[in-house]
Image (cartoon, grey):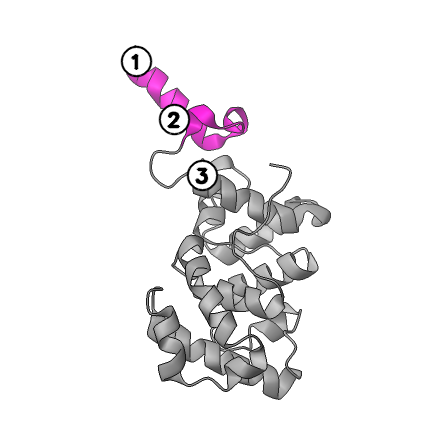
Amino acid sequence: MPVAETELHYENPYQLLVAVMLSAQCTDKRVNQSTPAIFRKYPTVKQLSKARFEELFPLIKSISYPNNKTKHLIAMAQKVVAEYGGEIPMDVKELVKLPGVGRKTANVITSVIDKQPNMAVDTHVYRVSKRIGLASSKAKTPLAVEKELTRYIPQNLIHKAHHWLILHGRYVCTARNPKCNECGLAEGCNYFTKSKRKKNESFEN
């Protein structure tokens, strides 16, 4: 997968931050259907900071947790304007200070926009890295998985590896019924090796 990048549609850091905040527990496809109307009405973070809840909510009501996300988007924009001069900070420590922005979102923004060696661990990255064996059984939390991945993946590849893992989990190494027979990583995958051994043992018995 030589071209591995986010499937969220955006044109600048502000738009990506909005899209990533909306994507929590929601599909990128659904987010991409909603963001054009948001960006038409609020083309800049300054304009979003002046939005009223009852104006923004209808634009994202089809997305999961629209109440909280509406509040977080407005509060985020207000803080960016008030404390960062309207510029989205490109620092994880600063980004997580924004309402509705956690470490995963901050890692996505900095790795996608600035190609910083930060690994965002969502459900796909967590599942795939554990299955393949890129993260050990000792890594029980997203942060623990993040630390192991960033320790062993070359720094210049981390921003791309994030998307490799996400896309692999989304289309091949799915949560249910992973497509092991179509997977180019099968021979080096712990999950595949164990599954193959179990099948052989059951056949022999």
Q: Can residue 151 be seen in this view?
A: no
Q: In this view, does 65 lie above or below 123?
A: below
Q: Residue furthest left?
A: 205
Residue assigned mark 1: 203
Q: Does the magenta stretch include residue 194?
A: yes
10 Å neighbourhood of mark 1: few (<14), some, or many (≥20)? few
Q: In this rendering, which labeled residue sits more in front, label 1 or label 3?
A: 3
Residue at x-position 51% and y-position 77%: 42
The residue singled out by tag 2 in the image is 195
Residue drawn at x 45%, y 55% is 28
Q: What residue type is labelled 2?
A: Ser
Q: What range of the chain is rendered magenta?
A: 179-205
Label 3: few (<14), some or many (≥20) within 10 Å?
few
Q: Which residue lies furthest to the right in this view?
A: 156
Please give the name of the residue rendered at 50% of the width and 36% of the height, measured from the top-left corner. Answer: 132
* Amino acid at circle 1: Phe
Q: How far apart are marks 1 and 2 (CA)?
A: 12 Å
- Give the percent coordinates (x, y) of residue 8: 52, 56
**Residue that carries the numbered disc 3 in the rendered image:** 171
Q: How many marks?
A: 3
Question: 184 or 140: which is nearer to us?
Answer: 184
Q: Is residue 69 toward the left or the right of residue 205 in the image?
A: right
Q: In which quarter of the image is residue 164?
A: top right
Q: Decide whether residue 81 is among the magenta residues.
A: no
Amino acid carrying mark 3 in the image: Tyr
The picture places residue 119, in percent across and down from the top left corner, at 59, 54
* Left or right: 119 in relation to 126: right
Q: Nearer the viewer, mark 2 or mark 3?
A: 3
Number of residues whose C-alpha sits closer than 10 Å to that of mark 2, classed few (under 14), some (14–19) or many (20 or more): few
Q: What element carries label 2?
A: helix
Among the two numbered marks 2 and 3 on one chain, the one whose residue lies closer to the N terminus: 3
**For the point 58% across and 77% down, which residue is it?**
44
